[in-house]
Amino acid sequence: MLSRWLTRSRSRGGGDDADFVSIESSEEKTVEITDLTPETSYKLTAIAYNADQRPSNPATATFTTPEKPTTPDPDKATISIEEVKATYNSVTFTLKTANAARFGYKVDVPDGTAELTFVNGSEGGTYTTDNLEAATDYQITAVAYDENGQAADPVTHAFKTEALPTGPAVVSIEEVATTHSSIRFTLKLDNAVRIAYKVDVPDGTAEMTVVEKPQQSTFLVGSLQAETDYVLTVVAYNGKDEPSEPATHSFTTPAYTAFARIDAVATAHGIYLKADVDTGKFPLYFLKIFDPDLTESSADFEEHFKVDSREQFIHYLEVASLTAGLKTASFEEWNKTLLSTRSQQVLLYAAPVVRQGVDVVCEDYGEIIEIPLTIPARDELGAGQAAVTLGEPQVAGKELEIALTKQDGVVSYYAGYATKSDVEAAGTPEQFVQAGLDAKTYDYDITADFQGTWKTDRLSPGSEYYFFSFAYDAEGKLGPLQYKEFHTEAAGTDYDTSLTVDIALKTASLSLIHISEPTRP
């Protein structure tokens, strides 16, 4: 009967023998040896002893420990290429990422030198690469980076583009939308590697526009004439350069849409505008002014404005928004933009626009209105007859109330007051107001906001004033000055000012002076 085992293990080539381990057992025994080194060869030796302590012959065995298993890093950036679909000239694929701060991809021939296209963000997406060669081997390469800039192992996917379609090319015109100056159309294509199209008058000689490897199906042709007959012709070609049967569509461009009537008047301080607009069709429009004395670039508006067939890049004046709250299609507005002091001749442009996403465009939506204007050197009182007449001033303490009456033909006006001392320092009331006109110090009210009563509560006690008004007519001429003299009474002092503060209760009370008015005779 066995009474004990001796076992030992040592690495091969590891030097001195390891010590034997004694195991007391008379039966079969499973022994686990720990703390071994990965990827290392070992020799195991075992000796058995009987009850008399006589040893058996040694039994040996050799083995090699496996590689140390790697634990995936849950925070490591990863990327995969999925859902690859190739045509003869393009490939579409989906990139899925995890823990990525950014990633990059490229489509190139094997061993090619194309550079990665980088995308910031943690989410992948679906991407398309066009303009590939038919029947050619390509490889998609993608790599992801974590927030520390550490790159994951690149992943690749090999594919081959399809051969050029050799079946009969077919084209049809599916959708058509026309304006007075353009046509937008959508094509349905089959086996088409190239298309050619033209828009021409019947029996015309316009040349075809050729599109190689068409990636889109919708096309726009502009610069057409209003109220004109045209024919759209489209031909498709297959991989053998064999043409399809032509697809044609005859149409007539509509007339210009009269979107608005614009009346404009130039004054020395600004431009008066009145517009009648179809707010349902054109909720927005551009108003722009070309000023020869202004040289600032208007590049931000270059693509949004077109006059006839030539682009006019002009100084931005104003974008007016006609809101749903506007009850009529007419409005009046003074432009407060400072014109060049040297300007004499300016040209005002008005164009209807619509909003497309974040852009505002005016392509093909109506007739553009051009209005030449002459800026007068100065606005002179009495050049016209427009007037806002004044009632008698009603004064009570610091308050003034005066009735205003707008005469026919008034398009804009000013109403306000000044101290008598300031007026007399300039000479007459007319001289005082004319000086303010020349200095462009007045803000004007439009007749759409006309109020029949003018009020203020900011007068000073014991002071003399002039109240005055003047108005512009539809020709920009300034009418005669209207004015009234008035004064306020001196203030009384029946009550004193007192102020008490309760700190503990965190409250305060304030009593103000009560100004008593002397009894008027």
Image: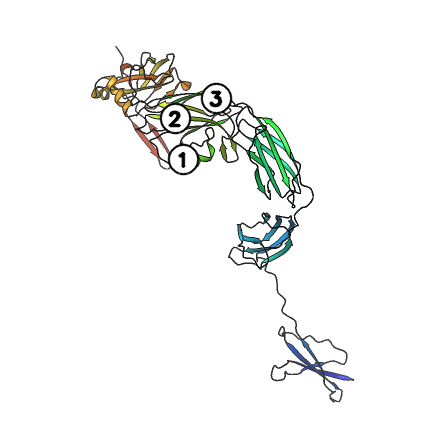
Which picture quadrant has residue 395? top left
Q: Nearer the viewer, residue 345 or 103?
A: 345
Give the percent coordinates (x, y) of residue 182. 54, 30
N-terminal label among 1 and 3: 3
Circle 2 SS class: strand
Question: Which residue is at the far right?
Answer: 1
Residue 298: give its label.
Answer: 1
Identify which residue is drawn at 42% across, 31% down: 312
**Looking at the rendering, in which quadrant would you find the N terminus?**
bottom right
Residue bearing mark 2: 347
Q: Quadrant of the C terminus?
A: top left
Please give the name of the residue rendered at 72% of the width and 85% of the height, measured from the top-left corner.
Answer: 58
Q: Secondary structure at mark 3?
A: strand
Amino acid type, mark 2: Leu
Q: Residues within 10 Å of mark 1 (few under 14, many from 20)?
A: few
Q: Amino acid at mark 3?
A: Ala
Q: In the picture provided, is 126 more to the left or to the right than 28?
A: left
Q: Total label count?
A: 3
Q: Badge 2 local density, few (<14 within 10 Å), some, or many (20+)?
A: some
Q: Secondary structure at mark 1?
A: loop
Q: Which residue is mark 3?
A: 260
| Tag 2 near tag 3, CB within 8 Å | no
Q: Is residue 374 visible?
A: yes
- Counting residues from the N terminus, which is met first, the one under dot 2 or under dot 1? 1
Q: Quadrant of residue 409?
A: top left
Q: Report if the CB atoms under discs 1 and 3 are less than 8 Å apart.
A: no
Q: In this rendering, which labeled residue sits more in front, label 2 or label 3? A: 2
Q: Is residue 492 visible?
A: no
Q: Taking 213 as reference, is 437 above or below it? A: above
Residue 502 point in image, percent of width and height: 35, 34
Q: Is residue 486 left or right of residue 407?
A: left
